[in-house]
Amino acid sequence: MAGDAVIESWTLYAVGVASTFLRFYARMRVDGFRSLQAEDYFMAIGIVFYTIQTTLAYNIGILAHGLANNGMTDAERAALSPSSQEYDFRIIGSKIQVAGWTIYSALIWSLKLSMLYFYTRLTDGLGRPYRIRIYVGFALVIATFVATMISILAGCQPFQNYWQINPNPGNSCQAAISKPIIWVSFAANISTDIYLIAIPLPMLWGSSLKTIKKIASTIVLGAGIFVLVDPVNGAQVAGAWGTREAFVAVMTTNLPILFPLFRVWLTPIFGSVLRSSQKTSYQYPSAFQTIGGGGRSGRSNDPSRRGPPTANPMSANLSFNGSEEHIVKAEAHRMSDFNAPDHNGNAPKGIIVSNIVEVIHEDKKGGSSRGGNSSDETW
């Protein structure tokens, strides 16, 4: 069984790391390292913690043989000789459990910060109320992380009692089953996850996306709730369940970025079912980026960065390319007749259908000139 657990642990780790490499590929394939955003760096930090956490889980079985200072009666504690090999195994296992909780918490909360930074771009241009929600999210995530770390580092005093065998140090000093650690971590996890999920859903369901796309996006954004599958029992078998929960957390954090990449790859197979956009570009008076958006806005309008003409220029900016995917980024000169707020100061609602035609002429000397025509309609 131990062999199966080792295979499972490293298989999940390999898949999680592979998904992260795909994430960075999706983000960098358009504009290299310049496409990386704050959430990508927090994801990279998370992978470092994930590597350490998986290694610790592996060593619980290899170095400590699955033992710690829990799961013993008082008689067994008194009978266990400090010079015995089992005693050493339990000391090592207890220390690994403390380190495991610390690294696991750092991993999970770094992924939460990654999601929050992703939301800052997702809601770019939507106004102060949405920014406030995200700032509250940052405060909540940081506060709950501090609370979790306090429960781990200060929950057992003196600290070395975490690896005390005899006499019984008590539940709070048995890291694998410590109720203070379990319940503080659980409460912090569920409160932050629910809040993070609640940030984008009102905007998503208030948009003009088709219902099926709203449902699909909700599943993608809400997948993180499954990190809470079994936090209580997970502490009792921290090596195995900690790795599983970490794997789910890594995958669900990568999913919003990987979803557009898979969509691009699968479009040639499934055709119009997975086509991301039509040739008409729908724009709103304030910005809301689609899942997977990651680059600087307006990039395609910069002549110095313009590449060769595309065969389908009308849909190029809406394709899921990991850098340019926006539902909106309305240009000011096209919004002058539409961006006045109402009497309550709220942003206007509506849809602008923008059709842009750009013609590039080239002469024999290699010079070029541009001409264009655009028309906007609102309703």
Image (cartoon, helix red, strand yellow):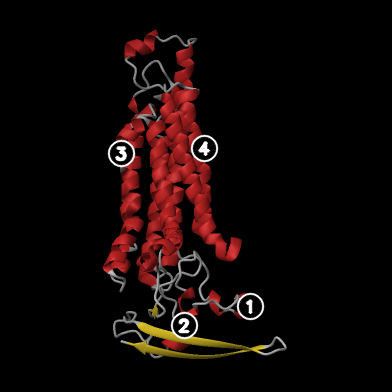
Residue 157 visible in this rendered orientation of the protein: no
Label 3 – label 2 distance at C-alpha: 47 Å
187 or 297, nearer to the observer? 297
Residue 217 appears in the figure: yes
The mark total stands at: 4
Which residue is painted at 42% across and 79% down in the image?
A: 279
Residue 314 image point, x, y percent: 46, 79
Residue 323 position in % (x across, y down): 51, 66
Q: Residue at x 40, y 47 (%)?
A: 249
User: Looking at the image, is mark 4 or mark 2 earlier in the sequence?
Assistant: 4
Say if 296 sits above or below 284 in the image.
above
Mark number displayed over residue 230 = 3
Image position, residue 33 (x, y; %)? 60, 60
Residue that appears at 33% across and 14% down: 74
Residue 377 coordinates in the image, percent (x, y):
36, 89
**Mark 2 or mark 1, earlier in chain:** 1
Residue tagged by mark 4? 52
Q: Nearer the viewer, residue 174 or 213?
A: 213
| Amino acid identity at mark 2 | Glu
Dot in front, 3 or 1: 1
Could you tell me which quadrant the N terminus lies in? top left
Give the mark, 4 or 1, whose residue is nearer the N terminus: 4
Q: Amino acid at mark 4?
A: Ile
Element carrying mark 3: loop
For mark 2, what is the residue?
331
Judging by the rendered image, the residue that carries numbered circle 1 is 304
